[in-house]
Image (cartoon, rainbow, N blue to C red):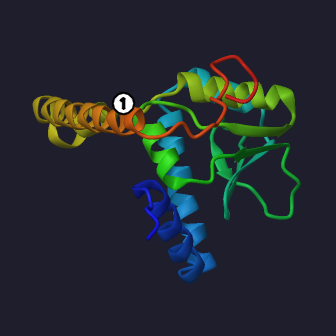
Amino acid sequence: MSATSPASFFDQLFDRVGQLLQPPPWLVEELQRRLVLTLNHVLQQEPEAQARLKRQSGRMVEARWRVFTVRLQATPAGLLDLGSPNQVPDLLLTVTEDSPFALATGAVRGEKPAIRIEGDVQLAAEVQWLVDHVRWDIEEDLARVFGDAPAHAIGQVLRRMGEAVRRFAGGAQASGPDNGTVPPAGPGQAGG
């Protein structure tokens, strides 16, 4: 009887479910549109990010992970829109880690995944700047709906939950075997 680690079990489960349940194209497009709306909401709170995207108007980035692909195009307003599937992207970003479990635990620990970058260097630098500097202040958005005090309380609960998950993931990683992967590049370095 072979022992299967929880990580490989979840990876295999993810693969099987992904093979059996392919979402219809309309659902994929709708989810991508929701992603664009969320990203634009965050970008509208960052004037410098919008200014940088305005300079890249018309340029398209394609992001890939396994069978998932999304194309985002910078608009003249400094926001994002879905890119045309017929247009060649100016920049291709591919997440090299196939394991959903490894990506999730890395994300919980605040790590960036390893990315293979192909295409325009200046556009890649702008995307890197956005990743490093743009943050969603969810507490501010909650305050608009619930008021300042409840939003602050919800924010504290979310931060505590995040810390608990980080500690748990850190403990799971520390007790697991070294997976032999190269860590992603730090800020300002290619690949990060």
Q: Which x, y percent locates residue 163?
A: 27, 31
Badge 1 local density, few (<14 within 10 Å), some, or many (20+)? Answer: few
User: Residue drawn at (64%, 45%), measured in percent from left and top?
Assistant: 80
Q: Which x, y percent locates residue 3?
A: 43, 62
For label 1, the residue is: 137
Q: Closest to the observer: 71 or 171?
A: 171
User: Residue drawn at (22%, 33%), measured in percent from left and top?
Assistant: 155
Q: Closest to the observer: 57 or 163?
A: 163
Q: Under tag 1, what secondary structure?
A: loop
On screen, residue 158 above or below 89: above
On screen, residue 100 above or below 133: below
Q: Closest to the observer: 67 or 28?
A: 67
Q: Residue furthest front?
A: 1
Q: Which x, y percent locates residue 100?
A: 52, 54
* 153 horizontally vs 105: left or right: left
* 142 horizontally vs 110: left or right: left
Amino acid under label 1? Asp
